[in-house]
Amino acid sequence: MSRRAAAILLLAAVLAALAYWSRGDREVDALNQAIKQHGSAALRDYPYQFRVLRLESGVATMTTPRSPQVPVYRMIRAIDPTVNPRNPSDPEFVAASKALANVQTEARQIVLSQPGVTQVKWELDRNWLLDHGIAVD
């Protein structure tokens, strides 16, 4: 094979790889845009912004601040500092917990309704938690 032919094949491979990776970014961007465009006011205005990180073989990986590793009262307190986290039966705490569950479910449903998405997988948003003073083991 000549040097010219090898260079052309190499260039074609690089361009194909770039097209493949940029396609994934565009799909993820479109999913995140769908959350913003189709979300309710409650979802759009919620202090935590759910987003898609990756889309692989129909599985959208989304961020969440919820985890068994992080006590819910700490995370709710970061979202709404006015809520008393020491009393889980406090009506404000219960309402804040339900609001979180509702917007997370809504974000998931929006992503699942988009073409090419068959499943949602959650990934803990460690950076958001750390930014809000919550250490994750």
Image (spheres, grey):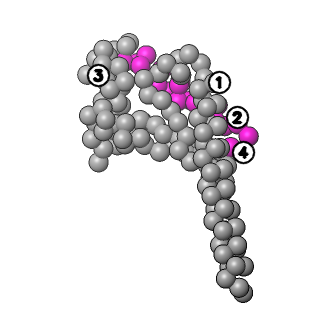
Task: Write the residue at 63% across / 65% down.
Answer: 14
Question: Can you identify the residue that label 3 sits on?
Answer: 85
The residue where tag 4 is placed is 116
Q: Is residue 97 visible?
A: no
Residue at figure coordinates x 47%, y 21% from the top left? 46
Q: Amino acid at mark 3?
A: Pro
Decide if residue 133 is on the left or right side of residue 66.
Answer: left
Which comes before the other along the chain, label 3 or label 4?
3
Q: Amino acid at mark 2?
A: Ser
Q: Measuring from the top left, give residue 120's x and y in whole percent.
A: 59, 43
Marks 2 and 3, how far apart in space? 34 Å
| Residues packed near mark 2 inside 10 Å, few (<14), some (14 to 19) or many (20 plus) | few
Mark 2 against mark 3, which lies toward the viewer? 2
Residue found at x 30% / y 44%: 136
Span of residues in magenta: 93-117
Point out the tag, 2 or 3, that comes first from the N-terminus.
3
Secondary structure, mark 1, is helix
Q: Secondary structure at mark 2?
A: loop
Residue under pointer 2: 113
Task: Indicate the position of residue 69 as horizontal and vertical percent values.
Answer: 35, 43
For disc 1, the neighbor class at 10 Å (few under 14, some 14 to 19, many from 20) is: some
Image: 135 above or below 94: below
